[in-house]
Image: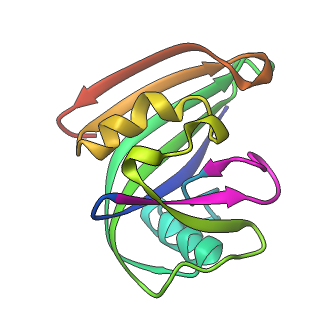
Amino acid sequence: MTKQLTLCLAVEGDKILLGMKKRGFGAGRYNGFGGKLQEGESIEDAARREMEEECGVKVTEMEEVGVHMFEFSSDPGNFLEVHVFRVDAFEGSPEESEEMKPQWFDIDKIPYDTMWPDDRYWIPLFLEGKKFKAQFLFGEGDGVLKQDIQVVEKL
């Protein structure tokens, strides 16, 4: 079974906007903003809605730059298909929500040690403006057991 999700990372100059997840899946980790699609919702609409719900900004310019396929060894055969968007423009100022506490980080000070372990593999490609397709298998403690990242011309 495959579940589709979204992930948005806003970039402004030499800074990236991440959020500390306060509850639910991934709590206690910095991540981009995103989540599940609602019934009848497009991937793009879900990305925009989640960004607004989680940090209060309205996306005005974004581009899909990656697709992740995540699998957990504890749940074989079930995949999370995560569509990654680069947000280059938005209206409003990021504000804390019940779910996320947004924070800007200098690109050379990204807190990889408090993020999902796969992030250190693909975020540098993201920051270089490359498009990619990636597969990750997570093991015990969410360690990366296998990874395969392909830079692509288009998704």
Percent position (x, y) of residue 64?
Answer: 34, 53
Asked if 4 appears above or below 137 in the picture, the reply is: below
Residues 46 and 7: in front is 7
Q: How is the image coloured?
A: rainbow
> Which quarter shows the C terminus?
top left
- In reply to whether residue 27 is colored magenta, the answer given is yes
**Residue located 64% across and 65% down the image:** 38
Farthest residue in the bottom direction? 92
Rendered residue at 56%/77% (across/down):
52
Q: Which quadrant holds residue 87?
A: bottom left
**Magenta residues, start to end:** 15-30
Q: Is residue 95 on the magenta stretch? A: no
Give the quarter of the figure containing the N terminus. Answer: top right
Residue 2 image offset from top left, x and y in percent = 62, 35
Q: Nearer the viewer, residue 88 or 103?
A: 103
Instruction: Determine if residue 40 is in view.
Output: no
Give the side of residue 150 with respect to residue 53, left or right.
left
As drawn, the residue found furthest toward the left would be: 153
Q: Tell how many labels.
A: 0
Res 18 seen here:
yes
Q: Residue at x 74, y 45 (%)?
A: 26
Seen at 66% across and 41% down, the residue is: 114
Q: Position of residue 57 (x, y in %)?
A: 50, 80
Q: Taking 68 as reference, is 1 left or right?
A: right
Residue 25 in the image: x percent, y percent? Answer: 77, 47
